[in-house]
Structure formats: C-alpha cells, structure tokens
Amino acid sequence: MFITDHIRYWQASGESIKTSMRTKARLGQIVEEGRYKGGTAPYAYDLVRRGRFNKKNKELYELEVNDFEATIVQIIFHKYVNEGLGIQRVATYLNESGIKTRSGQNWHSASIRGVLKNTTYTGILRSGESRSGFLPELKIIEQETFDLAQNICLQRSNNYQQKRTVPLNTRGQSLLEGNAYCGHCGSKLTLTTSGSGYVNKNGGVTGKKRIRYVCYNKTRKRCDCDGQTGYTMSILDKTVEDVIYQVFDRLKGIPENEIVGKKYQETVKAAQINLTKQRWILPRQPRS
C-alpha cells in the first residue's frame, strides 16, 4: 500500500510540474502576442472589453489607461528619479497628500517598489522572461525615466558592490551613510544612535543624542577587525566635507582650458592604448 501511494504521489507531482510549465509557456505566448494575460489589472489600468473572444467564445478583457491613476504613477517616478526621494518617502508623500491606493489603503514601500519595477508603464507587457513588443496605447512612463529608476534601485541596494553615483540617503543628518567603509576590514559603516534628547516644558532641549558610524563587522564580531569600533558622525562628516571644499578650491584656480586639455589628452591616450591592443588581437596575415 505504501509503495502504491508513493507511486501515485510521484505521478501527481510530475503532472503538476508539467501543467505548470504548460501554463507558463502559454502565458508567455499570450504576452509575446501583445495581449493581456488576465488577472487583476495593474495600477493605472482598467479592464475593458473590446470584442475579443477566446476559443470557448468567452469575451476577454483588455487593458486601458486610467488617467487619474496614471498621473499618480508619473508622480511616483518623478519624485523618485528627479527629486531623489526614497521609496518610503514617496509613500509618505502620497499618504500625506491624501492619495490612497486603489483599495483605499495607505501606500507602503512594497507597493511603490512594485510600481517602479512594472514594465507595463513603458508600454511593454511582461510574463516571467517573456516580453511583448512596444504597445504605445499602454505607455505612461518614458523608457529613459524607467531605466533611470531601475539604476537608482540597483545602486541603493545593500548588495551593490560597484562605485555608486546615487546617494543611499537623501534625508537625515548623516553625510556618508551607506558610502563609508572601515579602512581595516572593509566592512560598511552603519549608523547607530545612543542617548536621547527631548524638548522640555520650557522649550529647551534636555539630554544629548549621540550619532556614530560603527564598523558592522566589529560590532557583530564577524571578523577580527583591528580598527576602532565607532566614529563620531559630526567629526567624520566635517573631515570629509573639508576635503571636498579643498578640492573645489583647487579647481577654481585651474584655468578651464587646462582642464579641458588634460581631459582631451587622457582620452587620446586611452584611444591609442585601445588601438594598440586591437592590433595585437588581430591575426597576422601570411605573406604571399
């Protein structure tokens, strides 16, 4: 009996996997044909009937842009890309402005992230790895704006290891949050707060809040870091700020034509090096 049940379970499991694969393939095919795959309409779109029927003679739904919600989507992208707000701050802005989700609830970071990641707003439907062609009637956001949003999302992620050109923190007192690393173990420096400050009944501030950058590896004992545990935020920020101002002051004293000329020389030198490499890569032709 046990063996029979096991065989039946194995057969059912195999059929379930096959059904899932067929469904996924079919949905991908529908999307590649430029048709809506079904389900709840994404935010900023309505489901409408336009006389398209399936094989069972059932009328199917199509997507149509909802003008009001489309404006909200444009606001979300504008705040995120052009004004530098983070996902949570965008959600806070919408909630404080009295703008609710389709269900009448407050916006949350997950819903904002879902909007920023949805390719439908560029006029391209998606299902897994499948993509449709460009559908201009569904376009709400320019492709360039969408790509900028994806780049910002990527650079603000904790796992991003390359050089950042987008600040992780656009609000608060810290200058280097997410961009400072321990010089001893290479760990990222995180912010920590100790103490407390509050406004007393006379309007004065009682107590003092201390904000520091701390080595994550050392505080969590993840490695034997021989550096100091923390750095006072105000001191470290001021040091970096002074260095930046010194660099700007030096640039002011350099003639503009000298800067342009040096950049031109660097570009020419890089092109010459690249050309030399290409010559070595090309196979030599035998002499006739």
Image (cartoon, helix red, strand yellow):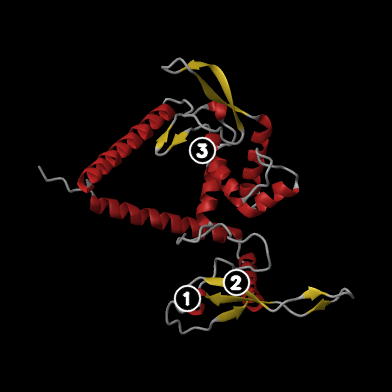
Question: How far is the residue under mark 2 from the one under mark 1?
Answer: 13 Å
- Label 2 neighbourhood size at 10 Å, few (<14), some (14-19), many (20+)? some
Which kind of residue does numbered mark 1 sit on?
A: Asn
Along the line of sight, the residue nearer the viewer: 241 or 106: 106
Which kind of residue does numbered mark 2 sit on?
A: Leu
Picture quadrant of residue 29: top left
Residue 12 lies, in percent from the top left, at 29, 39
- Quarter of the picture containing the C terminus is top left
* Residue positioned 46% across, 79% down in the render: 221
Residue 152 lies, in percent from the top left, at 54, 52
Which residue in the rendered view is the most extreme toward the right? 202
Numbered mark located on residue 174 in the image:
none
- Label 1 neighbourhood size at 10 Å, few (<14), some (14-19), many (20+)? some
Question: Pointer 3: what residue?
Answer: 119
Question: How far is the residue under mark 2 from the one under mark 3?
Answer: 35 Å
Numbered mark located on residue 191 in the image:
2
Q: Residues at badges 2 and 1 in contact (C-beta under 8 Å)?
A: no
Q: Is residue 221 above or below residue 163?
A: below
Q: Earlier in the sequence, mark 1 or mark 3?
A: 3
Which residue in the rendered view is the most extreme toward the front? 1
Q: Can the viewer see residue 86?
A: no
Question: Pointer 1: what residue?
Answer: 217
Q: Earlier in the sequence, mark 2 or mark 3?
A: 3
For label 1, the SS is helix
For label 2, the SS is strand
Q: Is residue 160 above or below residue 101?
A: below
Q: Earlier in the sequence, mark 2 or mark 1?
A: 2
Q: Is residue 175 above or below residue 185?
A: above
- Label 3 neighbourhood size at 10 Å, few (<14), some (14-19), many (20+)? some
Which kind of residue does numbered mark 3 sit on?
A: Thr
